[in-house]
């Protein structure tokens, strides 16, 4: 902290002298050829204040804003909330490619069944039964994962031109209307695939993706369906690991999640079936990097598709940018028994973007950042530690606010004085609620 302050003071002096010289600093852009600018001086008017508060008199509504992990969108239809995504010229979303990841998850489960069929059908009835833990029926990542699994296993049915992602409750006899029985032919034998049960894991207080609820659900399901459960699938590792620890590990039932959290990756050695890395190391970097670039007044691609002066750059196999949606999406990778050794530390910064930015040209800026639920396994055990590694590298002084996962006001109440900050990073409780934040920034 002390070092940071000293450096901030130096930066302040430096940027003051730039102003005094009348240098046209702060407007440097990488050239069109995509080479990094020689120097990227900080905008002269944005001098850090001694008290560590916001360093400019930019109106809150014009400050850089990044939505992350929960994309502003209609929770019923999935339609993107373009007003929130284009709130100002420096607004972006950072997440990951939900459909590509969902397809990977479905394929991973299917291939596991095919490769291990001899041990899968536990009671030999020719029906491969699975149960599914759904995170949040109104979250587009959760919806995509439910669809991906149903599609790969042949249990999907259409609803309004899309795969139905509704929970079935229980479906012991295969009569539920939100799914159908699928078939798989393996080694010349025909199997039926049935979604025996699925439910949204929401606790009584309203928190979604709730691991404890999933742990209870597997207790209920296993006592109702017993040996009929051959596979456990979850929209994330938090819920997946809760079910694994409560039941499937002891019963040797392969369990699949999503996120590649450390505990889940380690559990692959103990029978956890697999997980998907959504490249949180790339997402956390992008979340902060777009703010850094906007604050520096440089091309948004700096240190992303175009190397910055420290050498930070991402290759196109780890992310895509969709300009119309103003959204960066990290790409996913399946993590299974074949490769899990490469994923044992989910909080490690991604090497190609691990170089420290020079504080004299990227002065420390103050950022407000919230996590929708301080108890969300992925965000608290993987994403936030990554953000905390990158904030130092990018000279961002971040106030981390942890929500209760239930009410937006629990978080927005703590954004009482946006003037104190140079930029904002927001992870909403509900994807419909972007306006609760932008209203505060517009005041
Ligand atoms: C993660 C989940 C997490 C959710 C929260 C998803 O992208 O995979 O683990 O609970 O985001 O928004």
Image (cartoon, rainbow, N blue to C red):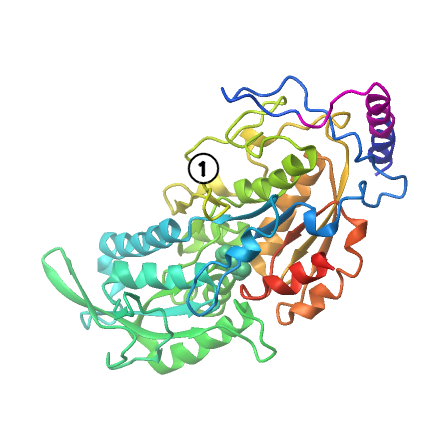
Res 124 → quadrant: bottom left
Q: Secondary structure at mark 1?
A: loop
Q: Quadrant of the N terminus?
A: top right
**Residue at the (54%, 66%) spot, across then down:** 432
Left or right relative to 282: residue 404: right
Res 380 → quadrant: bottom right
- Would you say residue 70 is visible in this rendering? no
Left or right relative to 223: residue 9: right
- What span is in magenta? 11-27
Residue 354 point in image, percent of width and height: 61, 31
Q: Is residue 22 above or below residue 272?
A: above
**Residue at the (38%, 68%) spot, across then down:** 132
Does the Cβ of the disc 1 residue fall within 8 Å of ligand 1?
A: no
Residue position marked by numbered label 1 in the rendering: 318
Residue 281 point in image, percent of width and height: 55, 41
Left or right relative to 148: residue 391: right
Q: Is residue 344 above or below residue 127?
A: above
**Residue at the (58%, 72%) spot, across then down:** 207
- Would you say residue 117 is visible in this rendering? yes
Q: Is residue 15 above or below residue 407?
A: above
User: Does the magenta portion include 35?
Assistant: no
Residue 426 point in image, percent of width and height: 63, 55
**Residue at the (43%, 68%) spot, across then down:** 134
User: Does the magenta portion include 24?
Assistant: yes
Residue 371 point in image, percent of width and height: 64, 57
State how many labels appear. 1
């Amino acid at each position: 902290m002390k070092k940071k302050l000293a450096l901030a003071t130096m930066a302040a002096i430096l940027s003051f002298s730039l102003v005094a010289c009348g240098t046209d600093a702060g407007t440097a852009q990488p050239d069109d050829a995509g080479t990094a600018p020689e120097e990227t001086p900080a905008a002269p008017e944005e001098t850090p204040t001694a008290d560590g508060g916001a360093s400019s008199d930019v109106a809150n509504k014009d400050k850089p804003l990044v939505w992350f992990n929960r994309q502003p969108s209609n929770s019923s239809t999935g339609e993107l909330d373009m007003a929130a995504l284009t709130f100002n010229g420096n607004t972006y979303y950072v997440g990951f490619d939900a459909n590509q990841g969902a397809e990977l998850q479905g394929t991973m489960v299917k291939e596991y069944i095919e490769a291990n069929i001899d041990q899968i059908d536990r009671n030999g009835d020719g029906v491969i039964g699975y149960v599914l833990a759904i995170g949040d029926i109104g979250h587009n990542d959760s919806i995509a994962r439910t669809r991906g699994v149903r599609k790969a296993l042949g249990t999907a049915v259409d609803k309004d031109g899309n795969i139905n992602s509704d929970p079935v409750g229980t479906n012991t006899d295969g009569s539920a209307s939100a799914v159908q029985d699928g078939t798989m032919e393996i080694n010349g034998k025909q199997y039926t695939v049935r979604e025996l049960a699925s439910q949204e894991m929401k606790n009584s207080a309203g928190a979604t993706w709730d691991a404890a609820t999933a742990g209870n659900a597997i207790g209920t399901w296993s006592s109702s369906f017993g040996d009929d459960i051959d596979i456990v699938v979850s929209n994330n590792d938090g819920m997946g690991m809760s079910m694994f620890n409560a039941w499937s590990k002891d019963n040797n039932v392969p369990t699949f999640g999503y996120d590649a959290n450390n505990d889940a990756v380690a559990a692959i050695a103990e029978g956890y079936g697999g997980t998907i890395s959504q490249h949180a190391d790339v997402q956390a970097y992008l979340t902060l990097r777009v703010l850094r670039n906007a604050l520096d007044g440089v091309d948004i691609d700096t240190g992303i598709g175009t190397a910055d002066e420290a050498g930070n750059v991402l290759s196109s196999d780890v992310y895509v940018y969709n300009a119309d949606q103003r959204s960066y999406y990290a790409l996913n990778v399946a993590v299974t028994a074949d490769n899990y050794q490469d994923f044992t530390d989910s909080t490690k910064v991604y090497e190609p973007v691990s170089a420290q930015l020079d504080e004299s040209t990227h002065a420390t800026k103050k950022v407000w950042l919230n996590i929708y639920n301080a108890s969300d396994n992925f965000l608290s055990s993987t994403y936030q530690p990554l953000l905390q590694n990158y904030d130092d590298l990018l000279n961002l002084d971040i106030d981390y606010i942890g929500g209760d996962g239930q009410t937006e006001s629990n978080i927005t109440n703590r954004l009482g004085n946006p003037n104190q900050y140079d930029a904002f990073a927001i992870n909403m409780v509900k994807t419909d609620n972007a306006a609760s934040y932008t209203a505060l920034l517009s005041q």
